[in-house]
Amino acid sequence: MTILVVLSITSSALSGLGGVNAYGASKTSNAKATVATGSVTCSKITGSINLSPPDQRGGTKPENMVWSINVSNCVTTGSNVVHVKGVRWTAAVHETTNACGALVYSKALHPSLKWNPKSVHPTVAAFSGFTFVRNKAGQEGFIMPNPGGSASIKGSFAGKDRGARSVVTLYTNLTARQFLAACDSKAGLAGYRIVSGTATFS
């Protein structure tokens, strides 16, 4: 009985130490992340925007718009971080309706950015809105912030003015006609791919 008690106490003590060590390791890991100064510009953007439920003409259901974006080909300027391979950023916009017409209205966006390498501290951006733009090939896209709007950043690459000069432009795989055709279809517009764009965080 005495041996069992001793073993039990020893096991509990070791378990507690394991928790302390894990917590300490976590704090150490976070402490190693560098908050990148200056700015970064990336010239390749791919990803997707998913709509649930799909957009439909005359839709009346609440909708979630989920952005999953991969950004690469990055170059830093005036930063304590020399090399950045890219960043993955996610964001969600909650719509009151899944009507296709709602897509054209400017909406605030708050993407969370996780950099590659992980040694660069994450970024949380805030754009007052985004609006439609179109490239030379006729593909529809978005620019953020919206004209006359604002941007801000917490974390890496906030520049000298908390990210006020940050701007992101991305283009989809759809033309305006294809957007309308998908909206008018029975299945609706469930999402679209991001095929190009540029991003500057500064």
Image (cartoon, rainbow, N blue to C red):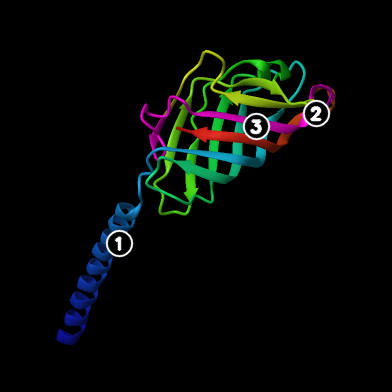
Residue nearest the observer in this picture, 106 or 137: 137
Distance from Cα at disc 3 to Cα at disc 1:
38 Å
Q: Is residue 201 left or right of residue 197?
A: left
Residue nearest the observer in this picture, 159 or 123: 159
Q: Residue furthest front?
A: 78
**Do residues under tags 3 and 2 come within 8 Å of each other at their CB atoms?**
no
- Name the residue at 77% across, 18% down: 57
Q: Quadrant of residue 155?
A: top left
Amino acid on which disc 3 is placed: Leu
Is residue 177 shown in magenta? yes
Residue indicated by mark 1:
25
Q: Residue furthest left?
A: 2
Residue indicated by mark 2:
137
Numbered disc 3: secondary structure: strand
- Name the residue at 83% across, 27% down: 178
What percent of the width, then of the height, locates residue 7?
A: 21, 81
What percent of the width, then of the height, locates residue 14?
A: 23, 73
Q: Which residues are magenta?
A: 153-182
Numbered disc 2: secondary structure: loop
The vertical placement of 47 against 101, above or below, is below
* Neighbour tally class for label 3: few under 14, some 14-19, many 20 plus, Cα within 10 Å: many
Labels 3 and 2: the sequence-earlier one: 2
Distance from Cα at disc 2 to Cα at disc 1:
50 Å
What percent of the width, then of the height, locates residue 101?
A: 71, 15
- Name the residue at 62% across, 29% down: 169
**Do residues under tags 2 and 1 come within 8 Å of each other at their CB atoms?**
no
The vertical placement of 8 against 164, above or below, is below
What percent of the width, then of the height, locates residue 36?
A: 38, 44
Distance from Cα at disc 3 to Cα at disc 2:
13 Å
* Neighbour tally class for label 2: few under 14, some 14-19, many 20 plus, Cα within 10 Å: few
Q: Identify the mark at residue 170; answer none if there is no mark.
A: 3
